[in-house]
Image (cartoon, rainbow, N blue to C red):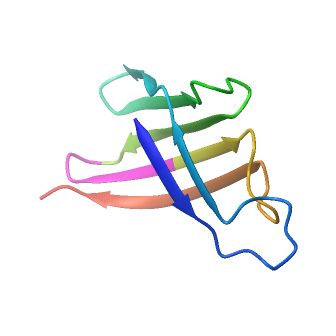
Amino acid sequence: MLEREVYDLASGSLHSTEATAHRWSNYISFKTSFNDRAGATWIAYVQPRFDAFEDVRVLGEGGLESKFTDLLSLTLTLRVRYDGAPPDGVNKYDTFVATGLRIDI
């Protein structure tokens, strides 16, 4: 996959304001049901650069779902991101957690 990014960085930053790279894109997914009312899913994407494997990006997203009824479910979502060589001022790790109600009609 060809990737081109343009960053809005402060002057004097160590990182270049533009980056172009070829990344190898891979993923794995998992889904299971604990019973007829609860289940879990997980998917992970791993994208190392061809010319610098230590510059890898990883995105993992998973969730749990518990059905109250056939129409109403409680969901929990976790998203984790990792960038092996982020631009100046950007953390290597980023996480996101959310809960929700899902209505199937």
Q: Where is residue 26 in the image (x, y as percent from the top left)?
A: 45, 23
Q: Is the magenta stretch mostly helix, strand or loop?
A: strand
Instruction: Based on the picture, tell me whether residue 74 belongs to the magenta stretch.
Output: yes
Q: Residue at x 42, y 40 (%)?
A: 2
Q: Where is residue 20 in the image (x, y as percent from the top left)?
A: 54, 48
In the picture, the quarter occupied by the C terminus is bottom left
Q: Residue at x 44, y 24 (%)?
A: 27
Q: Please, is residue 85 above or below residue 31 in the view?
A: below
In the picture, the quarter occupied by the N terminus is top left
Instruction: Based on the picture, tell me whether residue 55 belongs to the magenta stretch.
Output: no
Q: Position of residue 9 (x, y in %)?
A: 73, 74
Which stretch is magenta? 69-76
Q: Where is residue 50 in the image (x, y as percent from the top left)?
A: 57, 24
98 vs 69, nearest the viewer: 98
97 vs 54, nearest the viewer: 54
79 vs 66, nearest the viewer: 79
